Amino acid sequence: MNAFQSMAASTNRCPVKGCDSRGHVNPSISQHCTLTACPAYRDRTGQPCEPDLSRVPLENRQSLQLFREAQNALASDTEQDMLAHWRMLPSEYQVEQVAIGNALLDVWYKSCLPTDLACVPRLSLTRHSRKCACRHPPGVEVYREGQVSLFEVDGRHFRAYCQSLCRLAKFFIRHKTLVEGVEAFVFYVLTEADQTGCRLIGYFSKEKRSLLNYNLSCLLVFPNHMRKGFGFLLIDLSYRISQLEGSVGSPERPLSDAGLAAYRKYWTRALLTRLLEHQGTDISVRDLSQETGIHANDIVSTLQSLELLKYWRGEHFILADKNRLRQKLSACLSTYMRLADPACLSWRPADYLTGGTA
């Protein structure tokens, strides 16, 4: 039980001066007993609402005072201020769980949130849906296979959504840093439709103009959808979009250990499948790169790990014995890998690729 819950249980009254505990930030609820649910505390007129410390148990007053100081310091809501003063909050005032549909996810890492959310112990999509009419991500739907869809969301046109997505991702990615500057990125959000709308599965982001030809900057599959093949689906879609762009790509470095393992499995399957389909006598690394969208350096490192590449007299030679390729591919197929159906992809170049306004 956190300090807010302890305070509510002991007094059953809202600690804000002049508040009679009637009303709630959620219009469908008639009463409240916590700061985060108090309409007066979140007054839209901007009038300050001071908690009445005399109505707060003695053991909770010090931590509540720290929260007030942090809350006041965050008036500007800049990213730097939020990060600095968010650290002032006691652990009981930081988000511990995220509820997405029927899934209740324990957060893995801390995330920097706006002031009105920094002290909520649980973020709930259901609660948000009562106030928001949107039932799918903004942007353009570029892929649909059954109930699964992929939406392309431009960080410039939907800045607030992309920032919120990054803050949500920070709960599950240790080194996630991007919140400001989302205008330079495009986000591809994977969802699964049900009777209430499109539920988040995961997403990947990419720079609009990458000098190093990165086709993926960040990838996340939420914990309740892990081990279902969706990570491989996002990777596959990133390469298929690169091919439609007429380019080859590679994920942004450095890769985590788990990220490298996932990519290695994907590269292995894609390359072995293409080599088995090849009918000619010779095929080069450049040919494989153009046909798969995978960068030549990634092809070389993958084939070397499979002992299918030989370097002789300044050139790479692929050892494409069919029986050996089938043995390697059979071992790779033991891992479930969900791949995209090209017929379901309706992606078209966006303005930032065709010379329009970015």
Image (cartoon, rainbow, N blue to C red):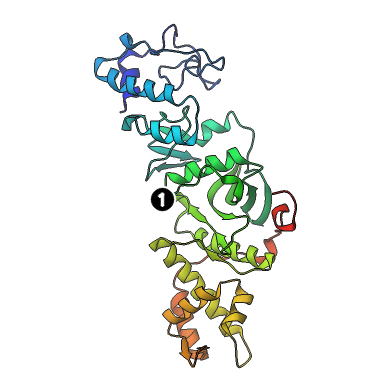
In this picture, is 66 found above or below 180? above
Left or right of 301 on screen, residue 194 = right
Residue 307: quadrant of the picture: bottom left
* Image position, residue 63 (x, y; %): 30, 23
At mark 1, the secondary structure is: loop
* Residue shown at the point (63%, 39%) measured from the top left: 135
Quarter of the image for residue 20 reads: top left
Q: Nearer the viewer, residue 179 or 16?
A: 179
Of residues 270 and 13, the one drawn nearer to the viewer in this rendering: 270
**Residue nearer the viewer, 100 or 110:** 110
Residue 149 coordinates in the image, percent (x, y): 62, 53
Residue 93 in the image: above or below residue 110: above
| Residue name at image x 51 percent, y 75 percent | 297
Q: Which residue reaches farthest left? A: 59
Q: Quadrant of the N terminus?
A: top left
Asked if one can make out residue 196 in the rendered structure from this viewpoint, the answer is no
Whether residue 122 is visible: yes
Placement of 260 over or under 309, stated as above or below:
above
Relative to 198, residue 42 above or below: above
List x then y, in percent, for residue 305. 42, 79
Residue located at (51% from left, 43% from top):
179
Count up the numbered dots.
1
Q: Which residue is mark 1?
A: 175
**Residue at position x 49%, y 85% from top?**
325
> Type of residue at label 1?
His
Q: Is the residue marked by circle 1 packed among few (<14), some (14-19), or many (20+) residues within 10 Å?
A: few
Q: Position of residue 251 (x, y in %)?
A: 52, 63
